[in-house]
């Protein structure tokens, strides 16, 4: 079946009979009784190891990325940590895109560095920089594409080829595009990561993470660590994410329409210095964006002309755009990365993340209402 159909039906069927539930129920039980000891190696014994609701979500997640396997975790960060514990060992080296989710860098630098895992950061818009950074010890390359918050792209297929020549695992954080607009496994990435907190859940009401892969050996290692480390998604949150996924296709279309509209408008605005959005023809990698994604997503950032104070007045004077971290929900959010999401990134590697850079997670509200709110923001700046 096609994406939209799978997103609704996969993972619901096992619970569904002609006379039964249309929606699969939430199995809250932490343990499962057996009529005989011989059944102790059944699929469901203890919820950390396996839970019917989480399994249903994992089936749905697999269908979205067309992956053989999917695993759900208690947050995107928990998925990342479990993945690194499963695939790396002391002495290994990681190469990552320099413009990354702040928390991802923090895990590399402030958690895994203590266990002897080194990391380097490069501008992966140019594959030559990735190649130059590889060492004998490099075990993993970590990409986000497009990046957060500057919306820079990396050529996923080319980086995958480079990694596979050297026996290196390529991980792609696909949170920004969601599987609706981009499928990194089909471009030969080895593992895809999602913070389901964002577009997959889609309603800013559930924290979660996911890993997808087609590689059986990698899957076995990830599944072992999912159970051993225990950072699993709860049955309730598994159900909430399943519900969110059913409308993912519709939401992504609307996120994109609103984001493209705002990006086009901001791009012509006299008070705006520059706009970062892959759907703009002026984006330096617009061509690559068209080739490797089937849409441009709902995230954009722009630099307002003026001072830090002007950026503050703008974001604080809006009514519809909540001044908040996170992204990917139905409601529009706005933030200043240098003060908020990227405050933990050291000053020297905030290339391009200036104090007047504003990041927007464009929601699915009415476009005219969103634009009017931004007009109000620019007026407030003019009047100050
Ligand atoms: C939010 C986010 C994460 C971390 O996910 P949590 O669910 O907050 O732990 C990782 N990568 C990206 C791109 C994100 O936006």
Image: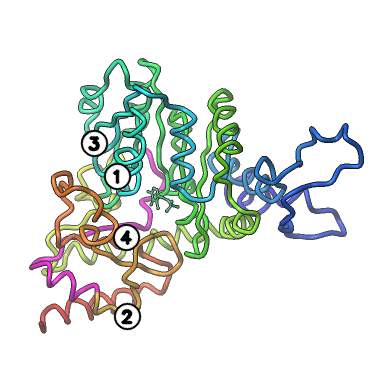
Residue 343, image x and y in percent? 24, 56
Label 3 sits on a secondary structure element that is loop
Dot in front, 1 or 3: 1
Q: Magenta part of the protein: which range?
A: 292-315
Disc on the earlier residue, 2 or 3: 3
Q: Nearer the viewer, residue 134 or 251?
A: 134
User: What's the distance in space between the residues labelled 3 and 4, CA to CA?
Assistant: 22 Å
Q: In this view, does 167 lie above or below 74?
A: above
- Determine the secondary structure under disc 2: loop
Residue 100 numbered tag: 1
In terms of image quadrants, where is residue 271? bottom left
Q: Is residue 365 left or right of residue 216?
A: left
Q: Nearer the viewer, mark 4 or mark 2?
A: 2
Sequence-first disc among 4 and 1? 1
Give the number of the mark in front: 2 or 1: 1
Residue visible at 84% across and 53% down in the picture: 17
Camera-side residue: 307 or 286?
307
């Amino acid at each position: 079946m096609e994406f939209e159909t799978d997103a609704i039906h996969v993972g619901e069927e096992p619970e569904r009979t002609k006379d039964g539930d249309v929606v699969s129920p939430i199995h809250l039980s932490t343990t499962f009784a057996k009529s005989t000891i011989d059944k102790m190696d059944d699929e469901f014994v203890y919820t950390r190891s396996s839970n019917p609701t989480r399994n249903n979500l994992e089936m749905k997640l697999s269908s979205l990325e067309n992956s053989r396997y999917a695993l759900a975790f208690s947050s995107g960060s928990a998925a990342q940590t479990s993945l690194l514990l499963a695939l790396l060992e002391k002495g290994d080296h990681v190469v990552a895109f320099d413009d990354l989710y702040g928390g991802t860098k923090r895990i590399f630098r402030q958690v895994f560095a203590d266990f002897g895992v080194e990391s380097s950061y490069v501008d992966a818009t140019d594959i030559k920089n990735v190649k130059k950074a590889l060492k004998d010890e490099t075990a993993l390359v970590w990409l986000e594409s497009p990046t957060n918050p500057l919306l820079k792209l990396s050529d996923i297929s080319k980086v995958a080829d480079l990694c596979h020549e050297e026996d290196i695992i390529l991980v792609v954080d696909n949170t920004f595009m969601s599987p609706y607009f981009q499928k990194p496994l089909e471009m030969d990435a080895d593992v895809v990561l999602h913070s389901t907190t964002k577009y997959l859940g889609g309603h800013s009401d559930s924290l979660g993470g996911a890993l997808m892969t087609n590689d059986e050996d990698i899957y076995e290692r990830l599944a072992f660590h999912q159970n051993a480390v225990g950072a699993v998604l709860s049955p309730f949150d598994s159900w909430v994410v399943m519900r969110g996924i059913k409308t993912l296709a519709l939401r992504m279309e609307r996120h994109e329409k609103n984001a493209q509209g705002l990006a086009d408008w901001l791009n012509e605005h006299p008070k705006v210095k520059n706009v970062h959005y892959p759907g703009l023809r002026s984006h330096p990698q617009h061509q690559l964006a068209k080739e490797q994604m089937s849409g441009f997503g709902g995230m954009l950032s722009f630099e307002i002309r003026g001072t830090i104070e002007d950026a503050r007045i703008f974001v604080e004077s809006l009514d519809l755009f909540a001044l908040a971290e996170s992204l990917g929900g139905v409601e529009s959010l706005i933030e200043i990365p240098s003060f908020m999401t990227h405050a933990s990134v050291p000053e020297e590697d905030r290339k391009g993340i200036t104090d007047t850079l504003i990041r927007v997670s464009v929601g699915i509200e009415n476009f005219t209402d969103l634009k009017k709110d931004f007009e109000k923001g620019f007026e407030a700046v003019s009047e100050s």
